[in-house]
Image (spheres, rainbow, N blue to C red):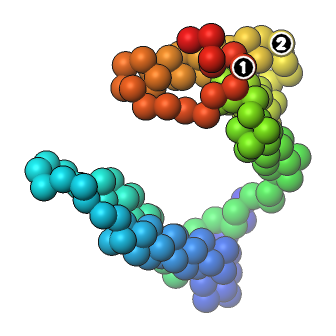
Amino acid sequence: MSMASGKKFDRPALVVGILLFVAAGVTAFDASRLKAGFTYGISPAAMPYVVSVFLALLGIGHFISAFREGLPEPDEADWKAFGWVSGGLLALIACIWLGAGFVLGSTLLFAFTARAFGRKAIVADLAIGFVLSLLVFLLFNNLLTLTLPEGPLERLF
């Protein structure tokens, strides 16, 4: 990694900072439109406000790093790893949209992400992802009584 010389600012960090501020604004706007159905305790808008503040703080951090001098040049993007993670996210979305459920989608996401980080034990990753996804589903479904997208497997529990 070589040091950046002659650059006034880091464009990618600036763009990410702007996108984080936009996401913070959208999240806060959506939170302001939530209607509370009760008059006690914390409203449903509390957590989106916390998330929007966190996103804004991340945006500030990116702005600071964008204009800071003496930072090393970032490494080249690993597009193959990006493709594996993106494929995992698309698999999760497809599984939920097509009714295959949270557990199958999250299992695929785990295995694809492990592959993106260079792990090649696909069968073991699928097994680990399945166990973790099933535990998360059971935690949400049985302990928290919050429903996650159900497929044929989830209906057994």
Q: Nearer the viewer, residue 45 or 57?
A: 45
Residue 106: where, in percent of width, then height?
Answer: 68, 30
Q: For the residues marked 2 and 1, what is the alpha-carbon distance in whole angstroms?
A: 21 Å
* Label 2 residue SS: helix
The amino acid marked with disc number 2 is Val
Badge number at residue 128: none
Which corner quadrant of the image does residue 24 belong to?
bottom left
Question: Which residue is at a point 69% across and 25% down the rendered structure image?
Answer: 151
* Label 1 residue SS: loop
Quadrant (top left, top right, bottom left, bottom right) of the N terminus: bottom right
Residue 48: where, in percent of width, then height?
Answer: 37, 59
Disc 1: CA contacts within 10 A as few (<14), some (14-19) or many (>=20): few
Q: Nearer the viewer, residue 155 or 110?
A: 155
Badge number at residue 152: 1
Up-down relation of residue 139 to residue 26 (above or below):
above
Up-down relation of residue 154 to residue 40 (above or below):
above
Question: Which residue is at a point 79% across and 38% down the rendered structure image?
Answer: 98
Is residue 132 visible from the viewing direction of this image?
A: no
Badge number at residue 123: 2
Question: Which residue is at a point 63% across and 28% down the rendered structure image?
Answer: 150
